[in-house]
Amino acid sequence: MRAVTWHGKRDVRVDTVPDPRIEAATDAIVRITSSGICGSDLHLYEVLGPFMTEGDILGHEPMGIVEEVGPEVTSLKPGDRVVVPFNISCGHCFMCERGLQSQCETTQVTSQGKGAALLGYTKLYGQVPGGQAEYLRVPQAQYGPIKVPEGPSDDRFVYLSDVVPTAWQAVEYA
Ligand SMILES: [Zn+2]
Ligand SMILES: [Zn+2]
């Protein structure tokens, strides 16, 4: 597949890389139809470079069509249209049950003293391949992806991944 990859400070390219595959029973593979570029991606472009590895796939604001699911993903099926949240969280740990999915204990990157793993966002957050790509492996897919209806265009939904919840949280805090 083609994917946006990091090669160094201010050096991002579109490369051909291996297609992702199901690795865990809770994974899904999503064919990406739209993917945001975030203000946070600018940190990777420059200042967070020391935490990147050449070839890392960027992107944490994707949506698309489910292609394949692992055996424990019963809430999704191939053909479903989904938005994928940037946090990777399990939905059943102490933190998730209290609405603190960004601190999910199942995906926490404890080796770096960080919270939940994120898609496409440095070694600090698990070095999970991101969604600025033709296909994405979504870990913890039994919980994270949000099904959206057919019909309206992607730009009606893609902001549910990061932009809307981040703004919502900021307003709540204010
Ligand atoms: Zn973002
Ligand atoms: Zn959790």
Image (cartoon, rainbow, N blue to C red):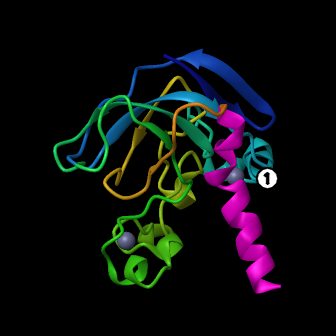
Q: Which residue is at 41% across, 76% downward?
A: 96
Question: Residue 10 appears at what percent x and percent y?
Answer: 81, 34
Kindly give the residue lying farthest to the front in the view shown. Answer: 151
Q: Which residue is at 72% across, 47% downward?
A: 44
Question: Residue 70 appears at what percent x and percent y?
Answer: 22, 41
Task: Please name the residue that numbered disc 1 is placed on.
Answer: 47
**In the shown orientation, is residue 123 left or right of residue 45?**
left
**Which span is picked out in magenta?**
154-174
Choose top left, top right, bottom left or bottom right for residue 33. Answer: top right
**In the shown orientation, is residue 115 left or right of residue 61?**
left
Question: Residue 102 appears at what percent x and percent y?
Answer: 53, 71
Relative height, residue 9 to residue 140 (above, below): above
Q: Quadrant of ligand 2?
A: bottom left
* Secondary structure predominantly adopted by residues drawn in magenta: helix
Q: Nearer the viewer, residue 139 or 174?
A: 174
Question: Residue 122 appears at what percent x and percent y?
Answer: 58, 51
Q: Is residue 88 magenta?
A: no
**In the shown orientation, is residue 174 left or right of residue 102?**
right
Relative height, residue 104 to residue 38 (above, below): below
Q: Which residue is at 65% across, 43% downward?
A: 158
Under mark 1, the amino acid is: Val
Q: Nearer the viewer, residue 77 or 109?
A: 77
